[in-house]
Amino acid sequence: MMTILTDIVAVALVLGVIVLVHESGHFFAAKLFGVRVETFSLGFGRRLAGWKRGETDYRISLLPLGGYVKMSGENPMDGPTGDPREFMSKPRWQRFIIVLAGPVMNGVLAVGLLIPMYMHAFPRHTFLDHAAVVAAVRAHTPAAQAGLEPGDRILAAGRESDPTWDRFLNEAAISVNRPLPLTVLRQGKILHLQMIPRAVGAANELRLGLTPRQPILIAQVTPGSPAAAAGLRPGDSIVALNGHSLYMRQSMIQQVQGSHGRPVSLTIVRDGARKQMEITPRRMSLDGQPPHWMIGVALSDGVTFERLPFLQALSASLADNRRNATLILVLLKKLVSGQASPTVLSSPIGIAAVAGQAARQPTWYPLLELTAMISLNLGLLNLLPIPVLDGGLILFLIIESVMRHDLSLKLKERVYQAGFAFLILLMTFVVYNDIARTVASHHFH
């Protein structure tokens, strides 16, 4: 029950902030050009609460699935009355700015939310920036079915060549339920494989069955330990044990413990140079635990904390949002061409599951990052040339500017009806998918 409540509160907070910022863009742009704003609403349907100030009714409405700004004379089907404060009475360039201001504010919010994260030591998993080398493969998963094996280096995945884990996971995320071509380097041979990524649960979590290779970095060396005697230092990267490459911390720990005191040969990388050291593990006890064979090092947990000054944080935020925007546009292109499955789309049900997970984390970073990503999504999706969306109205304005006269009200009415029907069908499909994933996930568990 508490999980559901957290999901509801989290999605209400996330979508509420995003919608408020989006509609504020329309609102302030309309005020700037002297357009009368009759209603500013968070939510649709019946008015639940609010206040009236001047000519505008500020309200919270029954259905919390968006919001709207109602401007005087904005409905082209009503026909203009000639009132200079009506939306349709304004020059097309002013109407263009008013419509565009909503998506632009979503972009501003996405950039703005990431800046304080980078200024306040944002945690990042270091493996994301390393080459995509596979450490382990779980049976009966997409990775196993594709034929991937430990030690494989992914040289290409879809449109990505020589990807880092970050870029590989993004490419897999937009290829859910569709074949993703892979080029793999295995023991000096080039292989061409194909993987079909899967996503599970209402949160649409990516499930590949892969464990990434992570650098095995020494964080601390215990004084007087075998590691200290051998000359190991913090910052050394352990790449092999007894001549066999290491891909996971756990593998190294298990092999050292299984040595039963026999000397082991470690290959490390220090300042770009490889060194080989022989170390004899010793039975040691930590924090009152039973003694184990150890060499006396503490390994890094693979998380770094970035603390950037404002201008660098702004640059990092812009770069992240540029990369995310490109990913969204590639996904849209794949959806239109049939190369991506519509099941990657999420309704408020799916967003609630993801938002709830983020809200249950020990810091606010995941929720802020999620809000930024959804805000960017909403801004870009609103620019699609679909009637009823901002992009549809922008398209009409561009066409009318080129033709130098307004399109007929009858044509606009038919196009708006078709656009509305399309969005209803799409939302029905996406909601059904989210419910089906949730039921399947609960049944599985």
Image (cartoon, rainbow, N blue to C red):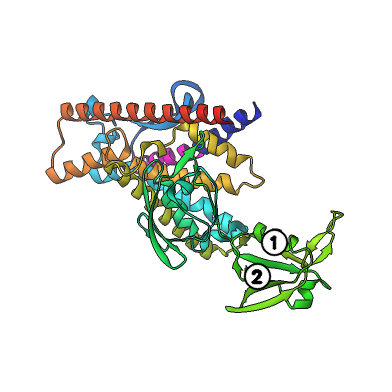
Is residue 328 or residue 411 the one in the foreground? 328
* Tag count: 2
Residue 402 x %, y %: 14, 46
Q: Is residue 396 visible?
A: yes
Dot placed on the residue nearer the N-terminal end, 2 or 1 = 2
Range of magenta residues = 17-34
Expressed as whole percent of the image width and height from the top left, the position of residue 61 reads 47, 24
Residue at left offset 83%, top offset 58%: 286
Q: Is residue 169 left or right of residue 294?
A: left
Which three-letter amino acid code belongs to the residue tagged 1? Gln
Residue identified by numbered label 1: 255
- Left or right for 185, reference 150: left
Q: Residue at x 48, y 31 (%)?
A: 437
What's the magenta bit mostly, secondary-structure-wise?
Answer: helix
Q: Residue at x 34, y 43 (%)?
A: 340
Along the horizontal axis of the image, is 38 left or right of 414? right
Q: Residues within 10 Å of mark 2 (few under 14, many from 20)?
A: some
> How many C-alpha atoms fall within 10 Å of the one at disc 1: few (<14), some, or many (≥20)?
some
Give the number of the disc on residue 204.
none
Q: Is residue 151 above or below residue 228?
A: above
Q: CB of mark 2 within 8 Å of CB of mark 1?
A: yes
Q: CA distance from mark 2 to mark 1?
A: 10 Å
Can you say which quadrant of the picture contains the N terminus? top right
Residue 371 or residue 400, whichever sits in front: 371
SS label for mark 2? loop
**Which residue is labeled 2 in the image?**
242
